[in-house]
Amino acid sequence: MPEQPVDESVVTITPLDRGPNLVKGTIRVVTPSGRVLVTDVMTKLCRCGHSEDKPFCDGSHKRVGFSSVENGPDFHKGE
């Protein structure tokens, strides 16, 4: 599937099957004390809890066999 251009005025978070949250749009990730970790238009945030670079994904989900897929039993069903 071809990459779609990022609309930087809208932030979209897409939980990837068996992977991280893909965040697109103008974003800033900051620590609780306010230190800016990254300002970008795209990043991947850990969902599996095993990343050594939290809150960012480092690919650990592949090593630990993280499984969360759309329409799976553990996937948020919405309101």
Image (cartoon, grey):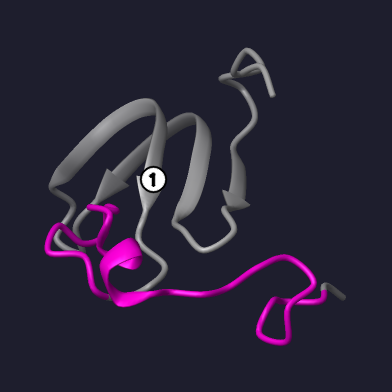
Magenta includes 49? no
Magenta includes 73? yes
Q: Is residue 31 above or below residue 22?
A: below
Q: Quadrant for the C terminus, please.
A: bottom right
The percent position of residue 66, horizontal first and vertical second, equals 43, 74
Crowding around mark 1 (Cα neighbors within 10 Å: few <14, some 14 to 19, many 20+) is many
Residue in the picture at 34% in, 63% down:
62
Q: Is residue 20 above or below residue 35?
A: below
Residue in the picture at 30% in, 46% down:
29
The percent position of residue 30, horizontal first and vertical second, equals 24, 50
Residue in the picture at 12% in, 64% down:
52
Give the structural element (helix, strand or loop) at label 1.
Answer: strand
Q: Is residue 63 above or below residue 53?
A: below
Q: Foreground residue, 59 or 8?
A: 59
Q: Foreground residue, 21 or 27?
A: 21
What secondary structure characterizes most of the magenta part?
Answer: loop
Position of 39 compared to 2: left or right? left
Q: Which residues are magenta?
A: 50-77
Residue in the picture at 66% in, 85% down:
74
Residue for badge 1: 44
Q: Foreground residue, 52 or 64?
A: 64
Quarter of the image where one finds residue 12? top right
Q: Quadrant for the N terminus, please.
A: top right
